[in-house]
Image: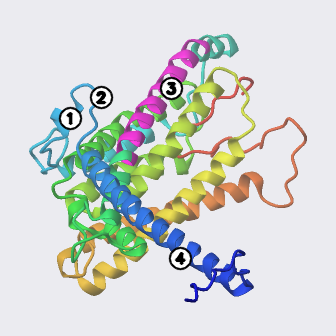
């Protein structure tokens, strides 16, 4: 009886095809595993982002009493102090009348000693005034940036109620950020910030009082900007413009730097970045007019109701915003050309001779030797 055939003692030699197949199989397994991990991680990240955005939409808790004030706050003309448009118009007219009475050329002292005594006593007060405005602007800027950022990421993730469920695209979210009715209605924190910024414009009129008391000339751009901005913030709130956060946020950010500059200048500190500050102001208005033009065109074409494809607001508010913001851009470009235009080289360490319009969207710099 024949025995069973002996098995081969040596294993079969692996071919190159076997190695390639094993490599492909390994890669397929790794790819599948990575795909599963990526799916779960992205799903968890999206859920976390949506939860964070949803939580961030609630009023900030780090400012004492802020959450209580912001929750359910709504700007209603006539129900809040100075909220009627007649207050803003009346204050602007009174401001211009007083400026006309006291003059724009600066108060003249009875002598050099009288001037130095008066200026010396006011410099510190002027510096504190500007530091206060810079600090308040910073707080409002942070609060508004937090609110707008939360809304934006909420729209992206779907926590802000994206259309059709789920998150919206980048452009759709950006559009909703400047046109959506929900950016204003039901957003008590934003409305409270807008109202606080509006009240701040009344206090900023003291800039001019300091200039007159210090004997400084008051430029057209200075008094025009102060009076027009007071009217602008009043009208935009009353007309319910969703896009008003754009010029407010940018203006607050610029004011943090601008009023810091004026405070340091009042204390005799020379700052090298005043030309950059003017450039930043012009950039601010370029962004402002670009965004408000988009919203205004959409509003005139499709109406002021975002629920029907329009842009939240009124035509009166759009016209008011366009006229004022475009005028700011033209005036600040002219200011830059006058101060730093081509063909006007300045000796090192020297400042432009035209002090009557120095970097002014608020106060005027008080130089140590001027």
Task: Identify the residue position indicated by label 4 in the image.
Answer: 28
Is disc 1 in contact with disc 3, using a CB cutoff of under 8 Å?
A: no
User: Label 3's element?
Assistant: helix
**Camera-nearest label, 2 or 3:** 2
**Camera-nearest label, 3 or 4:** 4
Residue stretch in magenta: 120-145
**Camera-nearest label, 1 or 3:** 1
User: Label 2's element?
Assistant: loop
Is disc 3 in contact with disc 4, using a CB cutoff of under 8 Å?
A: no
Quadrant of the image containing the C terminus: top right
**Camera-nearest label, 2 or 4:** 4
234 or 40: which is nearer to us?
A: 40
| Residue 20 visible from this viewpoint | yes
230 or 300: which is nearer to us?
A: 300
- N-terminal of the two: label 1 or label 3? 1
Looking at the picture, how far across and down is residue 131, in whole percent? 50, 26
Task: Identify the residue position indicated by label 3 in the image.
Answer: 131
Task: Identify the residue position indicated by label 2 in the image.
Answer: 63
- N-terminal of the two: label 3 or label 4? 4
141 relative position to 84: left or right: right
Is disc 2 in contact with disc 1, using a CB cutoff of under 8 Å?
A: yes
What distance separates the C-alpha of mark 4 from that of mark 1? 53 Å
Give the main secondary structure of the magenta stretch: helix
What distance separates the C-alpha of mark 2 from that of mark 1? 8 Å
- Tell me the crowding category of disc 3: few under 14, some 14 to 19, or many 20 or more residues within 10 angstroms, Cα based: many
Looking at the picture, how far across and down is residue 360, in whole percent? 57, 45
| Residue 101 visible from this viewpoint | no
What distance separates the C-alpha of mark 2 from that of mark 4? 53 Å
Q: Quadrant of residue 124?
A: top right
- Tell me the crowding category of disc 2: few under 14, some 14 to 19, or many 20 or more residues within 10 angstroms, Cα based: few
- Tell me the crowding category of disc 1: few under 14, some 14 to 19, or many 20 or more residues within 10 angstroms, Cα based: some
Q: Residue lying furthest right in this view? A: 347
């Amino acid at each position: 009886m024949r025995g069973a055939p002996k098995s081969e003692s040596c294993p079969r030699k692996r071919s190159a095809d076997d190695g390639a197949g094993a490599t492909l199989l390994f890669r397929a397994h790794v790819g599948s595993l990575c795909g599963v991990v990526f799916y779960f991680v992205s799903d968890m990240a999206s859920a976390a982002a949506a939860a964070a955005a949803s939580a961030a939409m609630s009023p900030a808790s780090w400012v004492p009493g802020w959450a209580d004030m912001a929750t359910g706050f709504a700007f209603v003309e006539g129900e809040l102090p100075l909220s009627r448009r007649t207050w803003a118009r009346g204050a602007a007219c009174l401001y211009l009348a007083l400026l006309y009475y006291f003059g724009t050329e600066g108060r003249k002292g009875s002598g050099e000693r009288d001037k130095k005594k008066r200026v010396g006593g006011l410099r510190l007060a002027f510096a504190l005034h500007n530091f206060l405005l810079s600090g308040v602007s910073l707080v409002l800027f942070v609060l508004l940036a937090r609110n707008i950022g939360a809304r934006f990421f909420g729209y992206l993730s779907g926590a802000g109620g994206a259309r059709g469920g789920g998150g919206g695209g980048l452009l759709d979210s950006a559009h909703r950020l400047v046109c959506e009715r929900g950016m204003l209605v039901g957003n008590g924190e934003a409305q409270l910030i807008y109202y606080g910024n509006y009240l701040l414009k009344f206090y900023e009129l003291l800039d001019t009082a300091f200039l007159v008391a210090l004997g400084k000339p008051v430029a057209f751009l200075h008094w025009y900007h102060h009076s027009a901005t007071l009217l602008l913030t009043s009208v935009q709130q009353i007309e319910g413009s969703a896009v008003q956060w754009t010029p407010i946020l940018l203006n607050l950010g610029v004011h943090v730097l601008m009023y810091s500059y004026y405070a340091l200048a009042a204390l005799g500190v020379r700052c090298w970045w005043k030309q950059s500050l003017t450039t930043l102001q012009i950039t601010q208005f370029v962004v402002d007019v670009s965004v408000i033009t988009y919203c205004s065109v959409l509003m005139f074409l499709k109406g002021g109701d975002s629920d029907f494809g329009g842009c939240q607001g009124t035509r009166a508010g759009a016209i008011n915003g366009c006229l004022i913001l475009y005028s700011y851009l033209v005036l600040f470009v002219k200011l830059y050309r006058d101060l730093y235009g081509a063909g006007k080289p300045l000796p090192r360490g020297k400042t432009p001779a035209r002090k009557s319009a120095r970097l002014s969207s608020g106060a005027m710099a008080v130089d140590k030797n001027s």
